Amino acid sequence: MTAYIVRRCLYAVLILIGVNLITFWLFFKVNTPDDMARMQLGSKRVTAEAIARWKVDRGYDKPLFYNADASGAAALTETLYVRKSLEMFRFEFGAADDGRDIAHEISTRMWPSLALALPVFVLGLLACIAFALLMAFFRATAIDFWGVVLCVVMMSVSGLFYIIGGQYLVAKIWALVPISGYAPGFDSARFLLLPVLVGLIAGLGSSARWYRTIFLEEVSKDYVRTARAKGLAETTVFFRHVLKNAMIPILTGVVVSIPLLFMGSLISESFFGIPGLGSYTIEAIQAQDFGVVRAMVFIGSVLYIFGLLLTDIAYTLVDPRVRFD
Amino acid sequence: MECELSKVQNPLNARDLYRVLVVIAITVTFLGGCGRAWNDPYPAAEHGGNTLYSAFSERPKHLDPAQSYTEDENQFIAQIYEPPLQYHYLKRPFALIPGAATELPKPKYFDANNRPLPQNTDAARVAYSIYEINIRPGVRYAPHPAFAVDAGGKPLYLSPDAEGLRGKYRLLDFPQTGTRELSAADYVYQIKRLAHPRVNSPILGHMSDYIIGLKEYAVRLGAEDKKLQAGRKAGEAAFLDLTQYDFEGARATGPHTYQIRVKGKYPQFVYWLAMPFFAAVPVEADRFYAQPGMAARNITLDWFPVGTGPYMLTENNPNARMVLERNPLFRGEAYPAEGEPGDEKAGMLTDAGKLAPFIDRIIYSREKESIPYWNKFLQGYYDQSGISSDSFDSAVRVGASGETGLSPEMEQRGIRLETSVATSSFYLAFNWIDAVVGGGGDPVQRERAKKLRQAISIAVDFDEFISIFANGRGISGQGPIPPGIFGFRDGPEGINPVVYERDASGVVRRRSLEVSKRLLAEAGYPGGRDAKTGQPLVLYLDTTARGPGDKPRLDWYRKQFDSIGVQLDIRTSDWNRFQEKVRKGNTQMFFLGWNADYPDPENFLFLLYGPNSGAKTGGENKSNYQNTEYDSLFERMKSMDNGAERQAAIDRMVAILREDAPWSWGFHPRDYGLYHAWLTNVKPNQMARNSLKFYRVDTALRAGKRAEWNQPVLWPVPLFILLLALSALPAWRSWRARENRVARVSNADINAGTGGGVE
């Protein structure tokens, strides 16, 4: 197992270099350091000297990949790519263009994101599995039929509708929870109740329908027939055998998304005023802040690779047929 | 096939269900009785305070007064820093009054031989001006750890290395604070900071053209800083002590007096003295924040401002909220005793002479989306709000003759509507160096291009634009100067005769499309085709609008040009490329806007001054307009005092512009603001950003209204639980039936093809 993890980590380094390179190239294909300076300095009364000064101060006065003015190794090291992008591998995120420390910003924003994403994830998973099991258990009955209809309806409605509708009904008309905002500690529960509920309902339709399909596929397998032939109760068949075996395909989609919970949700955080990481990348792209963009892409890539690794490990735990070698 | 069902057990008996509902009802009632609305977004500890609740949508980038140049940032720092001058809160037209200064400075003029000149000297003779500013004695800074000293008078929190900052991540982690008296040297220090190589002030370039020696000073500081920082890592920059480097442009001549030397005669300089760029910054704060490790902890002057104004920033979390609290050491400022006619009747002078500020705390919450912001305003959780286009119809009622008023729902809630025309211009610019719409060097071609621009100015109906895309919130432009600025002409003489005409009954109306088509034909494009080649005339509009939401506007533009037979090709690009095209003059037409820096016509007319050409000199004349007579008039007008002579010069300049039509004059937006009944002393002021000190809140009224408007509706909670339980009932019954089935195969199993189970 250790050898497998080490091997995957080495692959990960290569993937991260590739992601880093593509992010860097794409960003500077769209934005030049001059554009970044203008964005920070504003569009009024900005002179060429001010732009030049800003670039020198922020280290954006170097060429992208090759410095013809430098000699030897410095021709490669005294470049924007090495100075700004490769630092990531030491987890040195540096400062955003507005001068604020990126690592501090991420560590501050991560917790509100998790406070929202984690309950939505856990409760959503439980609700979806329970609902899917219910439909599968009562397959080909009215419960199953109307359950599927409900799923299709729910997945056809835009997530934004759930948010605006939830805010209007629960927070405005019924005045049961605040419309938006956030507070640290236990007081956060008041603010998270509605977004968690909305997140849960918004994700229920598609996930429950997918899990139902997985359960139905398992139900039709021979070992289920054998279990029934042995005289096991239907509940025992479902909860002890079907559920466990159906977890393998479910794990594929679920475990990989666990690390990404840190990255937050853009729309929910924006509408519910939760100061998380969801909007950090988008705001940075709009502000042409390369420091934040590269950091968030890098962290996103690391977490995704970590999620895939976790998924592989989880396979071996739930399916004895899967081995690392 | 027949199915045999056993007796089904009831999953929840009626008594259990009743018990559950009672428990829920008791819990709900208990929570409701806590004396605070359930949907109150503010912590209980902050309840009932003398607080103003507002919101912001964009996080501020800079709170350093040398860097901040946007409205989003000014709403915070204008309450914290005190420039020497400020705008009168109530008077219109906008009038400068002393802020931290004791009186308005009168510039002294000198010739090249340092001989004093009289006040009415012609600008050409003035070599330089001296502004001597006296500041009020006894003004003190808000408490701040940078001023904290030990018994020996040494700063408490100056550490040679980052070790001294162990465990300190916020300003609150420095428990001791101190203060000191404001001095003239602090104002001089801030002017020097404009040239600091690492501050990157956006006005350094502009001010270098006026403040004597500032340009050279910036070069000198750059060299000194380079030496100082040699060998240091990024983020560990050493403190560049500007007190060690003087320059002739700004110097303190006494503890409460300082002088600024300005090249030539620049009457608009006094307006700059009312902006945070020229507020005082204490060197102690700069030195405190420059300590190693501070920047890495986000403890910087750009993050935690320190000033002498009525408020101080006590919480800076731009992702969630910003909190300003009353500066306990603020000198106090009397509420104005005079204003415009009608202010007294409107109750704006009730607090005349009383010492401001009247509010203890201002809480700004971050609201990125307009819908939650609007709903929270309606719930009473924000004291004031703008009106987004989403909520315009529910907030404002437009009468048959176009007059606007509040909707019945708003009136019922006691909400007030305040409107004011923004000191801004939004216009369609024609690129003067483009051969088709600018005309180039050939006089005949220039005349043709002029007719073409005039034809387009008539055809693009901005009155309709305001009506469709701005909910009627704006007035159509008759020239570059917006209302409220000296030089603006109201009434018949303010009408642009190229685009508008007066009919027989005296009503002003837009000239007809027939006039536009005639001008187009005179320009050499009869029916929208080149008279010589017969080719259709295709014009190009550059814009950044390209999303689905922009389509109606882009279609409207096409329709306007199509109305005179001209084809419009819209070229969309991102903001960077758009700016680059405009900067290089690679455009034909584009939309742009300008917000006033200060209420002087020079601040608008310079946008069309030839030597400011964007393509040639990188200036703000983005349409690259050139007219010798206009330029000459501008040079005279800019240094004149407001009066008949200046008005005459402006009238002539505006007449030239209307005839030449380098812009289609677009419109001046009208700002709409809504205020709850408990927020008083509010009068929109497009220039003054430091007005919150004059606002007053009736906290008892607010608390009552909030409680009234936010009664929780409880019945959905037990109903929801009941529905959930009822929806589980069929499943429960079905399961029980299946469990109690006896050796029979159900229809469902047969249909599903699974064979069913056996008991």
Image (tube, rainbow, N blue to C red):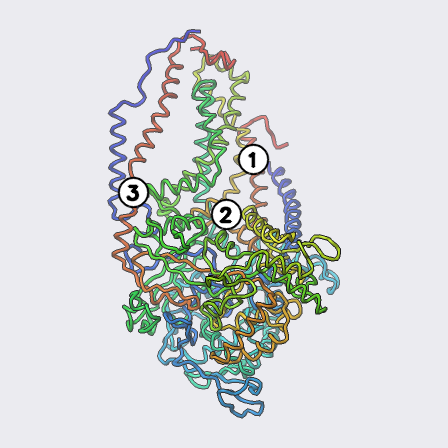
Separation of residues labelled 2 and 3 (CA atoms): 31 Å
Write down the residue under mark 3: B712
Q: Nearer the viewer, mark 3 or mark 1?
A: 3
Write down the residue under mark 2: A278
The amino acid on which the numbered mark 3 sits, given as a three-letter code, is Pro
CB atoms at circles 2 and 3 under 8 Å apart? no
**Taking B635 as reference, is B344 above or below it?**
above
Q: Is residue A239 visible?
A: no
Chain of the residue that carries numbered disc 1 in the rendered image: A
**Taking A135 as reference, is A26 above or below it?**
below
The image's mark for residue A311 is 1
Q: Is residue B363 visible?
A: yes
Separation of residues labelled 3 and 1 (CA atoms): 45 Å
Q: Nearer the viewer, residue B547 or B284?
A: B547
Left or right of B363 on screen, residue B505:
right
Q: Position of residue A325 (x, y in %)?
A: 64, 32
Classify mark 3: helix, strand or loop: loop
Separation of residues labelled 2 and 1 (CA atoms): 24 Å
Classify mark 2: helix, strand or loop: loop
